[in-house]
Image (cartoon, coloured by chain):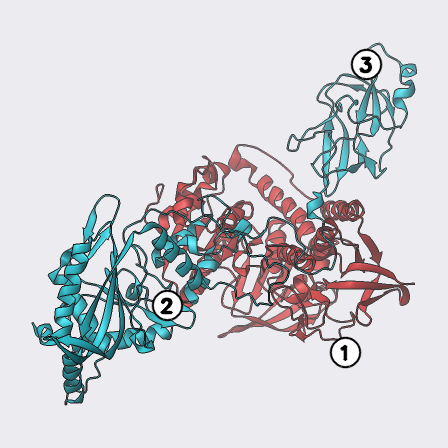
Amino acid sequence: MPIQILMPALSPTMTEGSVARWLKKEGDEVHSGDVIAEIETDKATMEYEAVDEGRLGKIIVPEGAQGIKVNQPIAVLLEEGEDASAIGDVGAAAPAPAAEAKPATPQPSRGNGTADTASAPRPASGERVATGVSPAAGEGPPPAPTPSGDRIFASPLARRMAAQAGLDLATIKGSGPQGRIVKADIDAALARGPAPITRAPIQTPAARPPQPAPFTPVTGDPSFTQKPHSQMRRVIARRLTESKQNVPHFYETIDCEIDELLRIRKVLNDGDLNLNLSVNDFVIRAAGLALRQVPAANASWSDDAIILWERADIAMAVALDDGLITPIIRGADLKGLQQIAAESKDLAARARAGKLKLEEFQGGTFSISNLGMYGIREFAAVINPPQGCILAVGQGAPRPVVKNGQLAIATVMTCTISCDHRAVDGAVGAQFLAAFKKLIDEPSRMLL
Amino acid sequence: MADSYDLVILGGGPGGYVAAIRAAQLGMKTCVVEREHLGGICLNWGCIPTKALLRTSEIYHLMQHAGDFGLSADNISFDAAKVVARSRAVAKQLSNGVGFLMRKNKVTVVMGEGKLAGRGKIAVTKDGKQIADIEAKHIILATGARARSLPGLEPDGKLVWTYKEAMVPPAMPKSLLVVGSGAIGIEFASFYRDMGAEVTVVEVLDRVLPVEDEEISAFARKAFEKQGITIHTGAAVKVLTRHKDNVAAHIETKDKAFDITVDRVISAVGIVGNVEGIGLEGTGVKVERAHVVADEWLRTGEPGVYAIGDLVGPPWLAHKAMHEGVICVEHIAGVNGVHPLDLRNIPGCTYCRPQVASVGLTEKAARDQGYEVKVGHFPFIGNGKAIALGEPEGMVKTVFDAKTGELLGAHMVGAEVTELIQGYTIAKTLETTESELMRTIFPHPTISEAMHESVLDAYGRALHF
């Protein structure tokens, strides 16, 4: 039976080719491995070797003919004993159905070995887009920042830069292929300013909340605008959700009287020291000292142990236009009021200007959030893990109090501590608040 | 009734035809207008035919050193006409291949000179006669560039050549002056020197291959001079006096002036964009320093008109044009995840002997940009394969950001380095640090091991030197 020699597909995308040159004439003996023709495609010309033995019976496609479809017969090979009369219909130029065609006799002598005669795939239909259209149409996967699952795709350089800068890759949206985080994304994150919330010095379990369904407005919803998430907003959302879901909070509230504190503050500020102490500076100092007195409150939960911090690094929440950041007074228990005042003023100013250095807002062992200036009487704050406690400070305002069985007026400041019950028990929280209250009520104790 | 297309591309060079294929893949009805031949300068008068010539000179050089390999060959000679014929045949084959690709992708090719003729309109003329009116939603200008001509050094096609004449010499000149030591000038200098000509190179800057790293420039210069090429840097050709069959050149450097007489001169003093005659006048397309101004998505100042490749400026490289073409088309089509071209990840290759290849920042550029760097070197003399090949002359230099381990640049000189530079380019594109490169297994014995060793050396860990 004569063998058809078919135009092979030299590459997955090849659909047609041309015979650049026949190296055998009709009637020539063909041995396995002989180069019988040069096939031209795209930019390449490839040699074709015979696999079968025989005699070239008929050349169907002449040299130079172009646009020959893959799997179209280009010649007929006669096996031993056969003569030209056997060519018959086999030599007709009608293309044999690809599925029935005997695998093409010639094989590319060079190439990638994928000379599969199966039909060449066209570009996937998904790749076709309407022409000249809005950027909404597109190909490829959606630019999801991270696919589902825990693996974060990031380049080695991006990983290293993020580690050096203390950035959490999970909070960064990747702009590379398939949402891969690349150097440019880290650069952009750093340029946007520091992440608002401290990085965990101890790894807490990285439980990621389930992805909520994307927001889709229902007919009849009022009109709205969508404000894209800032980097900071994402971090706030993620970290505080984690905190509220994973950290068992409890709350304790105490009233402090600050008349004496206000008096001393006035004396100091009016004096010749050129001071401008705020109530909050006293609060930071008092909290630092109280933590030294009740070290069990200066604690963090970790899977293996409770971490007892030996220094009170107090993070103070500073409100920004789009979120908040918590710069840290390191060693607040060791610093005097003057120094605390200077540092907190400087940190707050630079926080608002977005000019904090990384180490100035990372870490911290205890937080204070003060909303007194807004007239808030009292509130409870969300713990910033892995810290164990956060103290929420309300407004100091004149209130009726009972002293020695008599109704009196005092300037009262209500403070609420939120504690991580895993690390700090109720009694410890209470001891801390008691110590704190004593320092605030009798601020001369802060001299010690 | 004018034909109407989604995209019309002026120019069928590497930028234009690749843009056309990508557009066709994305389902656009696409047309390429080409005035001369598909494949452009690259394929017909640039990259490809010069590589064919340089292959000839390389083999010729090897044959002359057959004895080094234990072989003997007598009466080694060449036939200039056949050398040129082979180069032309290679170009022809590939140009035909581009035509094939256009047909395969159902891209319409109109042979003629295209010109913007009002918003969304292109007029095509051939031999002064208008042959087509084309309407297009989007137009990409990809008309390329041509050799710059300096006053007094104007090419005449006979005695003073551009790359074009230099590629098809009727006979080999006995002596040759090459003005300009960029990639084009140096490749011709190398070719003609290996074919036996006395070659002088004059470079106005203080070193040859001025875009390359300084150490690579110095290394290459030494190698060229060892081959007998005369090099004058910080020098300028002030006057060319054209005689009947030779040229007298008056050359001045900072501290001396002298004359030489040569058979032929090659002017390779840079490139200017083909901005004329394509109807830019009166449009929003801005031209600065003989190049079209385009933004990161290759948009010009005229809505719906884009520009790519040599036309928009350096680096004048075919692969840069191709990528710009793809980026431009994908941006037009609104494909997700398209990124502008990262200029720091474009490799550059010069196919002289020894070859030169690089990607990214030179050591000096990195330092100038404020990076604290770690620099690695590895000489070919420490590489087994290079010694076995008889190619011990070469070096690989790597520049890392000391802080992050980012590979800022890689610079290579020596045999086959043009085929190797892609390794570092992939590394840069994937943003690997030194750590992944160190852990990558390079096959032994290959010249590529020198790439590994250079990385190790940057961190004081080179093994074989």
- Whether marks 1 and 3 lie on the same chain: no
Residue closer to the observer: A378 or A270: A378
- Left or right: A334, with A363 as reference point: left
The amino acid type, in three-letter code, at marker 3 is Glu
Percent x, y of residue A148: 49, 45
Name the quadrant containing residue B2.
bottom right
Camera-side residue: B1 or A246? Answer: A246
Q: Gap in Å between the C-alphas at discs 2 and 3?
A: 85 Å
Is residue B223 among the parts visible in the rendering? yes
C-alpha span from label 1 to label 3: 71 Å
Mark 3 = which residue?
Answer: A79
Give the total number of marks visible in the rendering.
3
Quick check: marks 1 and 3 in contact, CB under 8 Å? Answer: no
Label 3 neighbourhood size at 10 Å, few (<14), some (14-19), many (20+)? Answer: some
Give the mark toward the camera: 2 or 3: 2
The amino acid type found where label 1 is placed reads Gly
Question: In this picture, is A380 found above or below A202?
Answer: below
* Shade of chain A as shown in the rendered figure: cyan
What's the amino acid at mark 2? Leu
Task: Classify 10 Å Cα crowding around label 1: few (below 14), some (14-19), many (20 and above).
Answer: few
The residue tagged 1 is: B282
On the picture, is A242 further left or further right than B37?
A: left
Bin the neighbour count of mark 2 within 10 Å (Cα to Cα): few under 14, some 14-19, many 20 and up.
some
Q: Position of residue A280 (x, y in %)?
A: 23, 75
Pointers 2 and 3 in contact (CB under 8 A)? no
| Residue drawn at point x = 55 percent, y = 65 percent | A226
Tell me the number on the disc at residue A324: 2
Q: Could you tell which of marks 2 and 3 lies nearer the N-terminus?
A: 3
